[in-house]
């Protein structure tokens, strides 16, 4: 019914909800053995990965790459699209273009989540920051259009950023920009904080969604918190969503068990909805 993937990290990172951080080879082997169809790869710098090795490993394990996550550039290096310093915005664009190049080779999408950063300073400074950030976002989008790579806007909860917190915020940005290469990435962990109804918000956003993240209310594996994933799956079926489900969770109690819990829980009812 749906392909199921999970988020892995090529490098050790401070960003918590990733599995097999810094152990990509082991992660891919484990995910393939557990029956996942694909992965989401969190990349600090896509130019520092052996592309030939990665392509061969994915082929060997029959795994797809659904998306490249980009937030490590912000959490590790401080690069962000809406940074108030031009030098950091330019570094962010350079980093994102590298991700887009790799995504083109992998047939993947590129996530614009934490790499947005946040708005700081006075109301006037925030307004200028937002305008300048949109300009560099547009530059990245033009580059992605040349490569026919989709960029995904991921709404993130208010405690992590003040830029695009709800699906409605994301839809408004997509409407303003008006590019077929810009889509929405709902994340159930963030939606549980920001949305009045996850199901109603997904239904309203149905024509915008390019990919979706599953994590429970505590950011552990689906089924270990209070989010009703059976209802969410039913909603995705009703709105005609045909993309992949990406698991982005904390490695609790450890990487392998978190991955195993996730796929076993989803497979226990995903074909019965």
Image: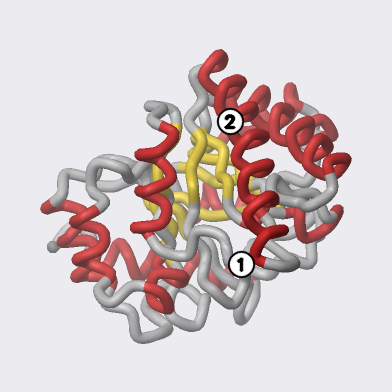
Please give left or right for residue 28 compared with residue 270 in the image. right
What label does residue 161 carry, if any? 1
Q: Position of residue 249 (x, y in %)?
A: 55, 68
Circle count:
2
Q: How far is disc 2 from disc 1 in space, using C-alphas?
A: 20 Å
Mark 2 or mark 1, which has the lower sequence index?
A: 2
Please give left or right for residue 127 compared with residue 122 in the image. left
Q: Position of residue 153 (x, y in %)?
A: 49, 47
Q: Residue at x 77, y 35 (%)?
A: 95
* Helix, strand or loop at mark 1: loop
Label 1 neighbourhood size at 10 Å, few (<14), some (14-19), many (20+)? some
Q: Residue at x 58, y 53 (%)?
A: 113
Q: Are marks 2 and 1 in contact (CB under 8 Å)?
A: no
What label does residue 103 carry, if any? none
Q: Residue at x 41, y 63 (%)?
A: 166
- Tell me if residue 114 comes above or below residue 53 in the rendering: below
Question: Relative to the observer, which residue lies in front, 246 or 77?
Answer: 77
Please give left or right for residue 72 compared with residue 112 in the image. right
- Tell me if residue 195 comes above or below residue 182 in the rendering: below
Q: Residue at x 35, y 48 (%)?
A: 171
Q: Position of residue 223 (x, y in %)?
A: 37, 78
Residue on which the image places disc 2: 138
Label 2 neighbourhood size at 10 Å, few (<14), some (14-19), many (20+)? some
Question: Relative to the observer, which residue lies in front, 253 or 33?
Answer: 253
Q: Quadrant of the C terminus?
A: bottom left
Q: Position of residue 262 (x, y in %)?
A: 44, 67
Farthest-out residue, front? 124
Residue 26 visible:
no
In which image quadrant can residue 250 be found? bottom right
* Helix, strand or loop at mark 2: helix
């Amino acid at each position: 019914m749906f392909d199921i993937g999970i988020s892995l990290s090529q490098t050790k990172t401070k960003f918590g909800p990733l599995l097999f951080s810094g152990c990509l080879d082991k992660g891919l082997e484990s995910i393939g053995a557990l029956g996942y169809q694909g992965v989401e790869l969190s990349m600090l710098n896509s130019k520092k990965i052996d592309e030939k090795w990665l392509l061969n490993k994915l082929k060997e394990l029959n795994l797809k790459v659904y998306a490249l996550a980009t937030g490590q550039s912000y959490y590790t290096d401080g690069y962000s699209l809406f940074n108030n310093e031009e030098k950091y915005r330019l570094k962010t664009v350079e980093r994102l273009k590298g991700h887009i190049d790799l995504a083109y080779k992998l047939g993947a999408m590129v996530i614009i989540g934490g790499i947005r950063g946040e708005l700081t300073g006075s109301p006037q400074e925030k307004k200028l920051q937002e305008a300048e950030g949109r300009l560099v976002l547009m530059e990245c989008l033009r580059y992605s259009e040349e490569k026919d790579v989709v960029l995904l806007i991921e709404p993130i909860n208010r405690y992590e950023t003040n830029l695009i917190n709800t699906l409605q915020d994301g839809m408004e940005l997509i409407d303003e920009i008006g590019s077929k290469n810009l889509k929405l990435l709902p994340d159930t962990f963030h939606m549980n904080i920001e949305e009045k109804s996850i199901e109603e918000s997904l239904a309203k956003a149905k024509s915008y969604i390019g990919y979706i993240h599953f994590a429970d209310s505590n950011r552990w594996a689906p089924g270990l918190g209070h989010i009703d994933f059976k209802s969410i799956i039913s909603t995705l079926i009703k709105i005609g969503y045909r993309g992949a489900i990406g698991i982005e969770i904390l490695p609790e109690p450890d990487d392998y068990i978190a991955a195993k819990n996730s796929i076993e829980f989803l497979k226990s009812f995903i074909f019965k909805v």
